[in-house]
Image (cartoon, helix red, strand yellow):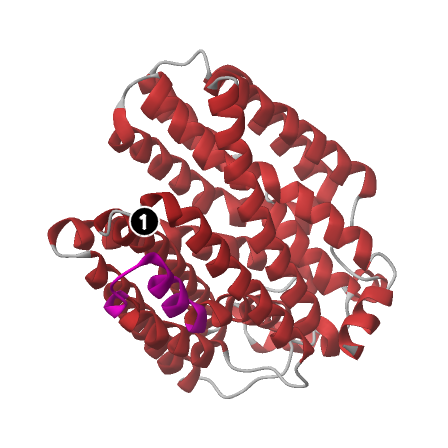
Amino acid sequence: MQFYRRTLALPGVRTLLVLVFFARIPGTAAGMALTLHIAVTMDRGYGAAGTVGAVATIGIALGAPVLGRVVDRYGLRPMLVVTTIGEATFWVFARFMSYPMLLVCGFVGGLLVLPAMSIGRQAIAALVPEDLRRTAYSMDSVSTELSFMVGPAAAVLVSTQFSTQTALMAMAVGIVVVGCALYVVNPAVRSKAEKAAVEKVPRRVWLTPRLVGVLLVGAGAVFILAGTEVAIVAQMQHSGELSWTGVVVIVWSAGSAVGGLVYGALTRSYRQATLMAWLGVLTIPIGLAGGEWWWLMLALVPAAFLCAPTIAATGEEVARLAPPAARGEATGLQSSAFTLGAAAGAPLVGFVVDHASPGWGFAIAGIGGVLVAGLAWVLAARQKEEAPIVVSPDTVAAKH
């Protein structure tokens, strides 16, 4: 536990972890609140809700690197002002919008989503020395798991106990509170040494095949997680035990959190492609667990242990390979990779489940992850193991 004690003793780390945990809750609740409003209150069905979600996802994927670049050039606060006003405005007026308007504004709202995930990862890289980043990113992954347990449940609670219109307004209030809190605290996105030595680096210098491979691993990991979530629901419905789904998902998330804590206490890091390959391999046979719901729950545990470590290792490697001057854009690309992985995993596995069986859903999610891990290995093989980029005029000139 010495790594955790040392990390938590660093100035600003405890405040950051608490802040980003609460900052991520509105984002994790957004999809559920919007889905319930469109599918239930507007009576447009889940397909229509999924279409709006897909359009918003495209906006998020396109906007994240741009917002990161804004942080690199102008700092955190200007970006927070734009995204807080933009996203809160969407949620205030969403309850009055027709379905076609939601399609259009969902894309614009996605472009302006407040990037709480990216902010947390950037701040960790600035506050935590490299030898403790594995532990810090592991805690960040556990925090993310917890926020995903709280956010959707809160959206369902408000929507069912009050109304979906109330839930949408609560989203607007939550975004404003989060944006103001981040603005006041203004977590550092570069250390003092990095600010003093910062120098612009062309994208082709730092966006190497190895970093692209890391981003692919991030997309592949979330592909597995999104696909597994769909397959869990399908399996529980198929076995007639849908009421136990919440328990299964909670145990699955708890297993991931435990795995993240264990990974953060290790004395060495493991390659992201290796972790994700094992995550995929352990996901493939989950569908073989038949019988009662607790068999499925137990079958999920081995793969669950590798979920948070894989995400944590990806964040650690992005922070290592990206120069401080481009860290915002790099973490934005990481967020885009996560978003696209989820956007691909859920519908693909859903299609397989509809035309085959829930067991094949787990298999496809795992096989997809293994294939992406293999592609990441190929990209890494094209480039020798590299040290973190040292920004200097010679480094930049050598690439021109």
Q: Main secondary structure of the magenta part?
A: helix
Which region of the structure is painted magenta? 287-302
Counting every numbered tag in the picture gives 1
Q: Is residue 118 shown in magenta?
A: no
> To which quarter of the image does residue 227 belong?
bottom left
Nearest the viewer among 228 and 107 is: 228
Question: In the rendered image, which quarter is residue 254 located in?
Answer: bottom right
User: Label 1 is placed on what type of residue?
Assistant: Val
Q: Residue shown at 46%/67% (left/top)? A: 304
Where is residue 266 shown, x and y percent of the image?
66, 82
Secondary structure state at the residue bearing disc 1:
helix
Viewed as shown, does residue 130 lie left or right of 235? right
Image coordinates for residue 371, horizontal then vertical, percent: 29, 73
- Disc 1 target residue: 233
Residue 299 shown in magenta: yes
| Residue 75 visible in the picture | no
Q: Quadrant of the N terminus?
A: bottom right
Q: Is residue 281 above or below residue 120?
A: below
Q: Position of residue 4 (x, y in %)?
A: 77, 71
Relative image position of residue 225 (x, y in whole percent): 40, 59
As displayed, is residue 330 above or below residue 171? below
